[in-house]
Amino acid sequence: MKLSEHFTLEEFTKSQVAKRYRIDNIPSPGGVENLKKLCLHILEPVRKYYNRPISPSSGFRCVLLNRQIGSSDTSQHITGQAVDFEVPGVSNKDTALWIKDELDFDELILEFYKEGEPHSGWVHCSYVGQSNRKKSRKYDGRTWSNLS
């Protein structure tokens, strides 16, 4: 199922952990609608700006899968409102800063990025809609800091 011009539902639900533990990682119709909005408002603009294909590393996660990987029950991945990704050949920090400056989003996290290692970590971004908080920060595995 196509979610947008360049993204499919399969890209957002594939998971080696789900496969290994036989977890049915399928979103509800509301979750699919959230994924469509995420693609339209976040991933498609990023893809267009950098003119490069993007493949989500983590998209939708059902509650069981989310718990299996040790994530919080409040994760926006559960509702189809969050995605983790990288843009090939582009610094993750540059991608995060472009999103921060140019797009409407709920939460933006530059995760596990190390200065001097432009392709370390990944970008986590969520989209809710009218109630987007525009909350941006970095997380290195221990501490949170401002994204700048």
Image (cartoon, rainbow, N blue to C red):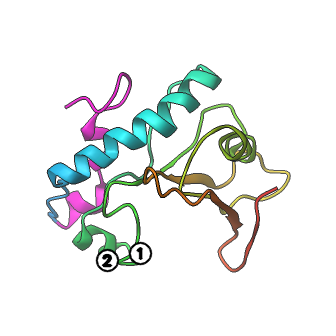
Tell me where residue 125 appears, x and y as whole percent: 53, 52
Instruction: Identify the image quadrant of the C terminus.
Output: bottom right
Q: Quadrant of residue 71?
A: bottom left
The kind of secondary structure element at disc 2 is helix
Region in magenta = 1-21
List x then y, in percent, for residue 6. 38, 24
- Judged left or right of residue 109, residue 15 is left
- Asked if 142 appears above or below 4 in the picture, the reply is below
- The residue indicated by pointer 1 is 71
Q: Which residue is mark 2?
A: 67
Q: Is residue 133 left or right of residue 4?
A: right
Label 1 sits on a secondary structure element that is loop
Check whether the beta carbons of the residues at disc 2 and disc 1 lie within 8 A of each other: yes
Horizontal side, residue 22 vs residue 57: left or right: left
In which quadrant of the rendered image does the N terminus lie? top left
Tell me the kind of residue under disc 1: Ser
> Residue at the right extreme?
116
Three-letter code for the amino acid on which mark 2 is drawn: Arg
Q: Is residue 56 visible?
A: yes
Q: Identify which residue is drawn at 42% across, 33% down.
A: 40
Residue at the limit of the structure toward the front, as seen here: 130
Q: Position of residue 54 (x, y in %)?
A: 50, 32
